[in-house]
Image: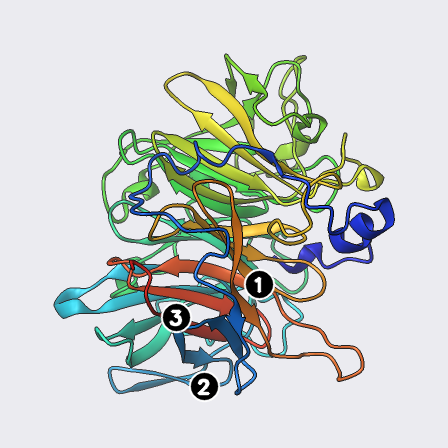
Amino acid sequence: MSASLSASASRREVLARTGALGAGIAFAGSFSEIFAGTAAAQGLGRNGYGPLVPDPAGLLDLPEGFRYKVLSRAGDPLRAEGRDEGKVPANHDGMAAFRGRRGRVHLVRNHENRHSATAGVPTVEGLTYDPAAKGGCTAIALDGRNNVLGQRVAIAGTAVNCAGGPTPWGTWLTCEENEDKAGTNGYTKDHGFIFEVDPIDPRRTGAVPLTAMGRFQHEAIAVDPQSGIVYETEDAFDKPFGLFYRFLPERPMGGRGSLRAGGALEAMRVPGVPDLSAVDEPGATFDSVEWVPVPDPLAKQTPIRLQDFGKKGITHAQKLEGCYWGDKAVYFVSSFARSAEGSAGDHFGQVWKYEPERRRLTMVVGFGPDTDIEMPGESPDNICLAPRGGLMVCEDGNGSQHVYGLTRRGEVYAMARNRQNIGTPEKPEWGEFAGVTFSPDFGTMYVNCYTPGTTFAVTGPWNH
């Protein structure tokens, strides 16, 4: 997630230089179709829930009437069912909330730890894939009032767990944003896989790589609840950039463990569009999208994005990140594209919509130097549906870091601001937000601060 914090000029700096800062130019595109399938009620005004109120504790600014509870911080003890499993690791990233029994909520939270991390996810027998890897997931059990009942390791020994996604049968698919092979950086096994995690009892799923779903730098997934097809984004750091995939399981919608049965992995080809960043017109539509079988999903010799897909080639995109399903379509985000780094065009974020029944791909929204400075952040990253229609978007860029809300009418409002300064008083810095998600009843927003690793529960008048 943190890859977009680079030496490149920030979006605000670019807009200041081009004279667009404060110009109030409307963003390009229409959010209405993104939200068409949400359970929106009244909708919100331009200011959302109101201005942010400074937090006296210096942790999280929220609108008046909202409050937060710190659920978990890096370094807290991991203890559940009477067992001590070490301490909560750092680098809190993707997350989802699942319904439990008797009003409980179960959170599964990624930890994007690389081989160089000083403290990784503690290894636990039966839940560890590669003891040399320091990433993984932890699980938090909450009662109906967001009191922590316990925290535990959900999977360990994985690498650079960035995002993922929930399944319709109530498990979490955690994604390794890494494709190191055994023998690289001290790893004892190949990495670059998806793993299934049971949020209530992780031992039901263990630490088994879903190899048929591909070995590459995974970011996020979304499952079509009708067909069971799994869509996957790839956040590759260098050119040629990542691909957008679909996985056709042998046992679609088969429940926990069914993805181990295998299936077919395919990559998206948009005829005439080798790089999505070349498209700069919101509303641009491409019919007859093709899906090309991946020659070697395990990437035994060659990374998938470098493999031979035939004379027609394949479609790439820089920084493919968030992915979710809604209104009979899958939406996915390209956080940014930079021609200086090899992309065909420049933008500060795109939202794409793919409709399987029509084989149609549409660029719904674009962010860029000609758009409103108050649009979500440097780079839209993790996204989720909001209670009253619209989206919550985690900002991952330079300067102040926010969770932004987007209404059905395309209006943007600040929902939260990270106040934890990880820099100095003279040169303050704030860690990105990640893992935004809502409780099953939409009464609580859960969100992570990546650094310092902090998980918050935010309650308030979400439906009023």
Give the residue number, with chain letter if any, for mark 1: 402
Left or right, residue 228 beside residue 121: left
Give the residue number, with chain letter if any, for mark 3: 458
**Image coords of residue 394 (percent x, y):** 54, 57
Is mark 1 in CB contact (under 8 Å) with mark 2? no
Give the residue number, with chain letter if any, for mark 2: 76
Based on the displayed image, in which of its 4 quarters is residue 368 positioned? top right
Is there any visible trace of residue 287 in the rendered image?
A: yes
Q: Tag 2: residue type?
A: Asp
Q: Quadrant of the C terminus?
A: bottom left
Left or right, residue 169 beside residue 388: left
Residue located 77% across and 30% down the image: 344
Please name whichever residue, 135 or 326, is drawn nearer the observer in this view of the structure. 326
Based on the displayed image, in which of its 4 quarters is residue 430 positioned? bottom right
Q: Tag 1: residue type?
A: His
Label 2's element? loop
